[in-house]
Image (cartoon, rainbow, N blue to C red):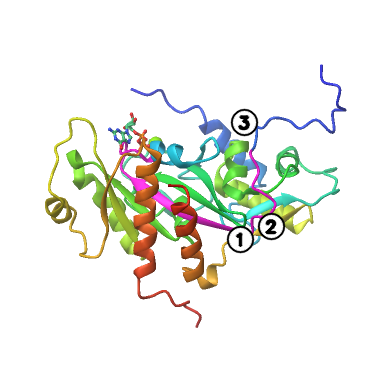
Amino acid sequence: MGSAPASDRALVPPGGTPSYVADSVRTAAKILVVGHFAVGKTTFVGTLSEIRPLRTEEPLSQAGAHVDDLAGVPDKTATTVAMDFGRLTLSDSLVLYLFGAPGQKRFTRLWTDMLQGALGALVLADTRRLHQSFDVMGLLEEFGMPYAVAVNQFDGAPHFPEEEIREALDLLPDTPLIGCDARDTASSTKALIALVEHLQTRPALAPQES
Amino acid sequence: MTPPRKREQGLVRAYVVTDGRAHPTRNTLDIVSLVNAVPGRSPAGLTPERRAVMDLCRGGALSVAEVAGYLALPISVTKVLISDLIDSGHIIARAAIPKAQLPDVQLLQEVLDGLRARL
Ligand SMILES: Nc1nc2c(ncn2[C@@H]2O[C@H](COP(=O)(O)OP(=O)(O)O)[C@@H](O)[C@H]2O)c(=O)[nH]1
Ligand SMILES: [Mg+2]
């Protein structure tokens, strides 16, 4: 058995051995990676994360807590919503967290937690079912969260001209639309870069200090 | 068909470990707030769940979300535990998103530079 006294021995938490944030880091930013089921969110986060991606599950209802969260949820068997996330160290003083979560028809507490303070969102889309991206795009728009759309080219998926995809998704002219392979580091990084470049061009960057 | 999730029991229990409270005492905690244990602070007297948070956060800083992930707890529960531990002087928040001035021009540039450097 181990030689360290019991009190000094770090227990390995259920999620595995932790990888800590560097001491010099002062700022943590977050970007959301969203989209419907099987669109590549977990893959995208895993491709870019320097830590083994983590997952949390949030109950959709708890006795006495946010009972309204369940109102209007048609599928009462969906009692948890899961979120995958990963971390990238961008400089000595800055880390970026990527949060991947499925679209929801309405806000849940987890979505509010994710959206709060996020820089923006990357919406992953699949040309075989573009309409399934509407829920999540609607939610982002409702919250005023800026986003870019990254189309993952799945094997065997039809290839559409950009204009057709823009139209099918009803994108605003300045919303970036990029192609992306969520399994590829450079491709996924470029998708994030396109999003951040878009965020820089937004006019309403002034703080809403009132 | 995927089998039903086994975690549900754990979730109910997790709710109990916060003494039935669903909301943290402070609302300034973000899921990317970086927290670590106050050095030398003893976990004596803490509940097992709070002690587990302390033990995890002794090794360095982690975001609230990472604490939740490593301890297999919902974010909401983790926020309650961490804010209690901040109140009792066991945990300190090192850095949080400067919400008031987001989105910040300089922060966006730093994020962009960091991403470009990875290509
Ligand atoms: N061809 C292709 N396959 C992908 C891409 N992204 C994800 N996949 C595959 O699609 C499946 C679902 O991806 P996953 O990340 O689990 O989707 P999630 O449900 O959105 O998290 C997996 O088998 C991935 O390997 C992509 O960009 N291109
Ligand atoms: Mg997934």
Amino acid bearing label 3:
Gly
Residue name at image x 44 percent, y 61 percent: A119
Q: Which is more toward the observer, B66 or A159?
A: A159
**Outermost residue toward the top in this view:** A1
The spot of residue A167 in percent (x, y) is 13, 56
Residue name at image x 32 percent, y 38 percent: A37
B78 vs B9: above or below: below
Relative to B105, B69 lies left or right: right
Callouts 3 and 2 on one subunit:
no
Residue range highlighted in magenta: A19-41
Label 2 neighbourhood size at 10 Å, few (<14), some (14-19), many (20+)? some
The spot of residue A164 in percent (x, y) is 11, 51
Q: In which chain is the residue bearing label 1?
A: B
Res. B25 image quadrant = bottom right
Amino acid bearing label 2:
Ala
User: Gap in Å between the C-alphas at discs 1 and 3?
Assistant: 24 Å
Ligand 2 quarter of the rendering:
top left
Relative to B81, A33 lies left or right: left
Find disc 3 in the rendering and name its residue: A16
Asked if ligand 2 lies within 8 A of label 1, the reply is no
Label 3 neighbourhood size at 10 Å, few (<14), some (14-19), many (20+)? few
Find disc 1 in the rendering and name its residue: B96
Asked if ligand 2 lies within 8 A of label 3, the reply is no
Find disc 2 in the rendering and name its residue: B93
Q: Secondary structure at mark 1?
A: loop
